[in-house]
Amino acid sequence: MTSFSIDRRSLILSATALVAAPAIARAQAPTKLRVGVTAGPHAQILEAVKPVAAKRGLDLSIVEFSDYILPNAALASGDLDVNSYQHKPFLDQQNADRKYNLAGVGFTVNFPIGVYSKKHKRWEEVPAGAQVAIPNDPTNGGRALLLFQDKGLVKLKDGVGYRPTIADIVQNERRFRFIELEAAQTARSLDDVAAAVINTNYALSAGLAPGRDALLREDPKGPYVNLIAVRDADKDKPWVKPFVESYQSAEVRDFVEKTFQGSVLSSW
């Protein structure tokens, strides 16, 4: 009787384990996340984040975009779970202008914006009255004008904050003619203008080396550190913390430093 009882109990335990196994497997299945990035460095960095995140139970599907507007639109609509490509002034502007409810949940990297030229090797060679292309979106266009003010090349109205426009220029002694273009087009304008302000990701995509080729470069200690964004309703979801930790890992920091050699700065 004793032997039979043990065998029967073993059979019952085995059967229970077989029934429970699928439920355990489901519980341990990785959380799938759709992550929006712009093509170039942001996409490269997310490829480095992907294996780190896998160790934390996250399965990342990386979706690349070629502009700055669509990744937030896709996140707000639910086509993405998270994106990583923008700084806080841009996110704040998008939330205000488009009535999004997106929130930053962790800092990533900084791309100091720079001024480039195919026609001149030094900024001092750029002549008075020259055409200079800048991004046409309020935050990056304003960022470009603040860079010129920081270098003493223009003066802006007091109190313009982080989003000045060309109309806010009150002093421009060298009479530069600022041409506003979509940020992704500024690198392509180099054949037609004396100089262009180009975001680092687009500069790298165009084969430019910010540390070597930029005639002028932004102070990296400003407010333009990039961040990870999610819908405000999702910011406390259980996958948010492991995703941020995966990005802000030693492995990803090493990748950024070795791959970009100072063109992109880890900022967490």
Image (cartoon, rainbow, N blue to C red):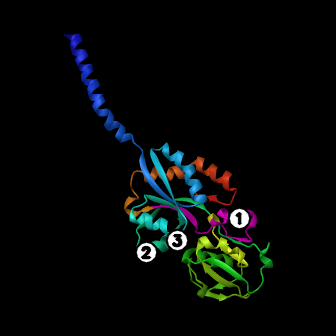
Which quadrant of the structure image shows residue 232?
bottom left
Span colored in magenta: 202-229
Asked if residue 227 can be seen in this view, the reply is yes
| Residue drawn at (49%, 74%) of the image | 93
Query: Marks 2 and 1, Cα distance to the nearest angstrom?
Result: 32 Å
Q: Check if residue 222 falls in the magenta segment.
A: yes
Which quadrant of the structure image shows residue 264?
bottom right
Q: Identify which amino acid the numbered label 1 is placed on.
A: Pro
Residue hosting label 2: 98
Place of residue 146 in the rendered image (x, y in percent of width and height, measured from the top left): 63, 77
Marks 1 and 2: in contact by CB < 8 Å?
no
Q: Identify which amino acid the numbered label 3 is placed on.
A: Phe
Query: Marks 2 and 3, Cα distance to the nearest angstrom?
Result: 12 Å
Residue hosting label 1: 210
Query: Marks 3 and 1, Cα distance to the nearest angstrom?
Result: 22 Å
Query: In screen coordinates, is 239 left or right of 256?
Result: left
Residue hosting label 3: 90
Q: Identify which amino acid the numbered label 2 is placed on.
A: Arg
Query: In screen coordinates, is 213 left or right of 203?
Result: right
